[in-house]
């Protein structure tokens, strides 16, 4: 099978399209790990975080903010990469089993739909402040936080790009 088709099979444009796959994993009693984000500029910090998150369970699901959602959260000019580009990059990781795109500001409804066994976010959150904490805990699941790789964030990359652009613009003028 063509490799891009394999990647596209991991991407779901809404939770309803994902139901058959989710039901199969539940039938097989797989431990389901879930995390979410915009993942606008994929970098080492994301790769490290997602790899560590996937270690908690048997299958790894990423809730991906849609273009509409990212624009509402991050503002004008975002996302830098459209949702298909972001979803394809995330799906290319061997340890990612599904990427589910959602339009809401938060993944609360998606988490309620999936009811993951393990919910993972970065350690910039307290577990009890993580969206979906109540759902996961009430279903007997666990909520984990992961340390970030120092110096890697989309904001840092964005700042470097802008600073370099401005510096080069000054040199030219």
Image (spheres, rainbow, N blue to C red):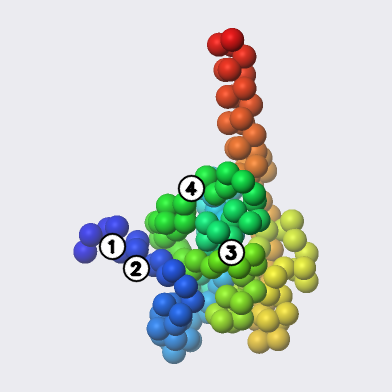
Q: Residue at x 49, y 76 (%)?
A: 15
Q: State which mark lies toward you, 2 or 4.
A: 4
> Residue 91 — which label?
none
Picture layout, residue 48 above or below residue 142 = above
Q: State which mark lies toward you, 3 or 4.
A: 4
From the top left corner, tell me how far across and down residue 29 is, in percent: 48, 86
Question: Which comes before the other along the chain, label 4 or label 1?
Answer: 1
3D distance between C-alphas at marks 1 and 2: 6 Å
Picture layout, residue 142 above or below residue 139 = above
3D distance between C-alphas at marks 3 and 4: 16 Å
**Which residue occupies the foreground of this view, 109 or 53?**
109
From the top left corner, tell me how far across and down residue 112 is, in percent: 61, 81
Categorize mark 2 by other alpha carbons within 10 Å: few (<14), some (14-19), many (20+): few
Question: Which residue is disc 4 drawn over?
Answer: 81
Categorize mark 3 by other alpha carbons within 10 Å: few (<14), some (14-19), many (20+): many
Question: Which comes before the other along the chain, label 3 or label 2?
Answer: 2
Quadrant including the C terminus: top right
Question: Which comes before the other along the chain, label 3 or label 4?
Answer: 3
3D distance between C-alphas at marks 4 and 1: 20 Å
Question: Which residue is disc 2 drawn over?
Answer: 9
From the top left corner, tell me how far across and down residue 2 is, in percent: 23, 59
Question: Which comes before the other along the chain, label 3 or label 1?
Answer: 1
Categorize mark 4 by other alpha carbons within 10 Å: few (<14), some (14-19), many (20+): some
3D distance between C-alphas at marks 3 and 2: 19 Å
Which residue appears farthest toward the bottom when viewing the image?
A: 27
Question: Which residue is disc 3 drawn over?
Answer: 36
Question: Which residue is disc 1 drawn over?
Answer: 5
Task: Confirm or deny contact between disc 3 and disc 2 (CB under 8 A).
Answer: no
Q: Residue at x 58, y 17 (%)?
A: 169
């Amino acid at each position: 099978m063509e490799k891009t088709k394999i990647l596209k099979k991991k991407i779901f444009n809404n939770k309803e399209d994902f139901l058959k796959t989710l039901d199969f994993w539940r039938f097989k009693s797989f431990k389901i790990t879930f995390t979410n984000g915009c993942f606008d500029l994929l970098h080492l910090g994301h790769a490290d975080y997602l790899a560590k998150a996937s270690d908690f369970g048997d299958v790894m699901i990423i809730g991906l903010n849609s273009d509409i959602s990212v624009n509402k959260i991050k503002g004008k000019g975002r996302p830098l990469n459209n949702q298909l580009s972001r979803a394809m990059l995330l799906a290319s990781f061997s340890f990612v089993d599904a990427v589910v795109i959602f339009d809401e500001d938060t993944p609360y409804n998606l988490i309620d739909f999936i009811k993951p066994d393990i919910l993972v976010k970065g350690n910039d959150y307290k577990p009890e402040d993580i969206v979906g904490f109540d759902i996961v805990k009430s279903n007997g699941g666990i909520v984990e936080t992961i340390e970030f790789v120092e110096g890697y964030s989309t904001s840092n990359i964005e700042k470097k790009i802008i600073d370099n652009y401005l510096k080069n613009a000054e040199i030219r003028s």
